[in-house]
Amino acid sequence: MKRKQKKSRIANPQPVVPSIQAETFRELLSLAEYELLLAEIERPLPAAIRINPLKTSPVFPRSLESKYSWQLEDIPFCPTGYRVLNAPTAAISAALEHHLGMYYIQEVASMLPVELFSPFLAGELILDMAASPGGKTTHLVSRGTDQSLVLANDSSQGRIQALRSVLQNWGAVDYAVTRFPAERFGEWFPETFDKVLLDAPCSMQGLRTAESHPSRPVTAKESLQLSRRQRAMLVSAIHALRVGGEVVYSTCTLLPEEDELVVDAILREFAGSIEITDAQRLLPFPAPGLTKVREQVLSTELEKSLRLWPHRFQSAGFYACHLRKLDATHNATSEPPFRALESVQYHVFTAREESDFCKVFTDLYSFDLAADLRSNRRTLVRHFEQVFVFPLQLLERFSTLPVQAAGMLLGEDTPEGFLPAHAWVNRYGAQCARGYYRLDEHQSAQWIKGNSLENIDAGDLPGQKYIIVLDHEGHALGRAARAGSGLKNLLRHRLG
């Protein structure tokens, strides 16, 4: 249960943005507020984390405080979000729980967009149009309790691996990663998705600098080019949305040309078909969007959108808007890319194959895989020696869409038996009643450094070749291979 928010703050060693960049926004604020903004952006930005409910219990934040002597402060608009007031980012990123995907390090303002959506329902279709590096995608997965199919798209090949890695570490199953221009989804999949997140590529003029959001000068021409692309992507999002569905549009810039002016143009283009819903309800005090930019008067409805100034929320500058689709929109359509699973050597298990496999798996680890597949509407898919857990919705709705990654790797066949995958073990290993070995505190410290263990009492070890390893606190650290009277560490990278 979250505790009452505290007022205290402590510096986190992240770079400070030179105040000269704030000159761009001087005309948008009163003199008093502008001076507050200048003072705020000279202060370091506190670190923040978002808890992974797929891998943790409600008492997990309290355990972090107890274990590391951290002081956590509630983030009012994100039930799973906390500022860490007395620890540097280096310590937070080095913690074992971070390596195990039990929390994600994320700037406070970036936790806002996904919280704007209404409660998620099992079986919904979610589109994340510009997903990499994946922080907000994991938030979508969490809010949907990993029972809503998330199509995580990014147009850049260079950013796909980061997206895949983040989702795997989070323990997500009901997702697929695609690499297409976001502008095409509206014509490929009209009136399809229940929720669409467009955290749009932007100039990143949020007046706070972080490793993932470096500050740099932006020309008016570049901002104009970005705003044109943002508008095209938002048009695509609206076309791809079913009637009654929701779009959240967000940026990590405070430039109105990429925020309110984009949304204002969309409101005029889709008049009667979309509406802005009042997003102020999530915040402890209002943060209205602009309704006038220089001499240009905008829709008064933009007051319902959110403009997070750093001095008001002790965050990076941010903009977000929640839209609901009221009526069908009409757009030219075209066929999406096509690639059958079979053409790239993926084979969906038959009912008999799945039943036989689940029986063997349950015998090894006493985990009812068949029940888990049924209750979560998932199935098994083989790719040569590898076995994956795929969401059925992906096969039912997007089976021929080329994907970069999907579902969760369950494991692979080897000559010495079935080797469960690291990602599966990290999420589900602690639920297994057989086929595991629990380390003591000293052994745990050695294991997370990548060391193997010798001279373990063979009577304490499970009989199969590949074993799930738990630390002394019950966290599933990964897999081991039996090696005589010892355990060979199969970690690819040390965890600490």
Image (cartoon, helix red, strand yellow):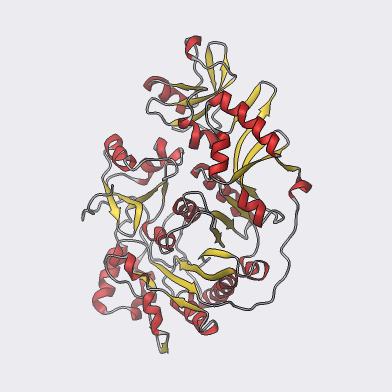
The foreground one among 113 and 226 is 113
Q: Identify the residue at image location x=49%, y=81%.
A: 267
Instruction: Report which quarter residue 372 is drawn in.
Output: top right
Query: Horizontal placement of 464 versus 415: left or right?
Result: left
Q: Identify the residue at image location x=77%, y=46%.
A: 342
Q: Is residue 306 above or below residue 460?
A: below
Image position, residue 442 (x, y; %): 38, 20
Query: Horizontal placement of 332 versus 454: left or right?
Result: right
Number of numbered discs: 0
Q: Identify the residue at image location x=59%, y=58%.
A: 153
Q: Identify the residue at image location x=51%, y=53%.
A: 134
Q: Is residue 372 above or below residue 11?
A: above
Spot the residue most to the right: 343
Instruction: Report which quarter residue 310 is drawn in.
Output: bottom left
Image position, residue 464 (x, y; %): 58, 18
Quadrant where the C terminus lies? top left
Query: Horizontal placement of 297 versus 350: left or right?
Result: left
Image position, residue 334 (x, y; %): 72, 70
The foreground one among 85 and 197 is 197
Q: Is residue 217 above or below residue 132?
A: below
